[in-house]
Amino acid sequence: MDIQTLITTAGICAVVFMLLVSVLPGMLRGVIANKAQNQFMAGDFDAVLKTLSGPMASFCLPKYNQEYMRLNAYEAKQDVEGVQRTLDVMLGLRATAQQRRILLSRALNFYETQGDEERATHVLDLIDSHVAECKGEALDAAKELKRDSRQTFNIAFRGSYAYIAEMEHALASADADERARLNYYLSLQYGNKGDEKRAREYLDRIAKSYGLVPNDKDDEAPTEDAGEGVGDDCHEEGGACRR
């Protein structure tokens, strides 16, 4: 083989290699993602985790996407330790502003359900940092996340019921997902206030919206004493009150 042929062959091999490096991961990414999604929809969450832990997934899937799918699988199988480990990894990864916002919201909700005030406080600090890093529309969304997260924290960990009137008013224009969130936190606030009857009423509204109980009552916020619950003892800094 003469030198010219050798150079030509080497050039062809280099081009083929570059094509494989640039095209193959994208092709495999769709295959692996579809496989994991089908396993998830079939309820085989252990299989999802196995797929995501394989070398092909590590090769072709972006790290954030890989861990996000892993988080979904651990949550679906109610593996608290798995969710915790995955959140620890994900909170240290680079992400877009939208990805970061969604992750921080999910992390705070998880720590709330676990009653983990220390980690929830850490997430609030991360949210503050996120706000400082955002600009434009991303900044507006980050500020909204900060506001909602402070409310969530105060209700869940500080026994606050300072947001009852605000949330009851917001129910009228909320979409289905937001109505579920508002009903849940209204239930918690009335529980914090000691009004178990009203707390149960808001929980029932969530169940009715998902067809779990007969929908025999209008799903409207109570009109009587609409501002009740925002007492003087609930106007501390941050909207929190300790009971």
Image (tube, rainbow, N blue to C red):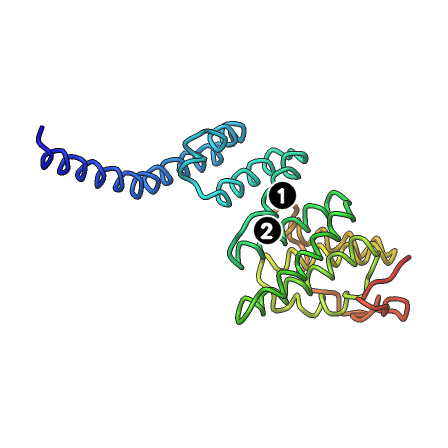
Of residues 11 and 149, which is closer to you in this image? 11
Instruction: Write down the quadrant of residue 172 in the picture.
Output: bottom right
Q: Which mark is residue 87?
A: 1
Separation of residues labelled 1 and 2 (CA atoms): 8 Å
When the figure is inspected, residue 89 is found, relative to residue 203, above or below; the finding is above
Q: Position of residue 143 (x, y in %)?
A: 63, 67
User: Mark 1 or 2 closer to N-term?
Assistant: 1
- Residue drawn 35% across and 40% down? 25
Q: Residue at x 73, y 61 (%)?
A: 150
Q: Nearer the viewer, residue 204 or 54?
A: 54
Q: Secondary structure at mark 2?
A: helix
Q: Is residue 152 found left or right of 139 in the rendered image?
A: right
Tell me the amino acid under the disc marked 2.
Answer: Leu
Amino acid type of the residue tagged 1 in the rendering: Leu
Q: Please report contact status of discs 1 and 2: CB closer than 8 Å, yes or no.
A: yes
Q: Is residue 159 left or right of residue 15?
A: right
Q: Residue under label 2, please give it.
A: 103
Q: Position of residue 146 (x, y in %)?
A: 67, 63
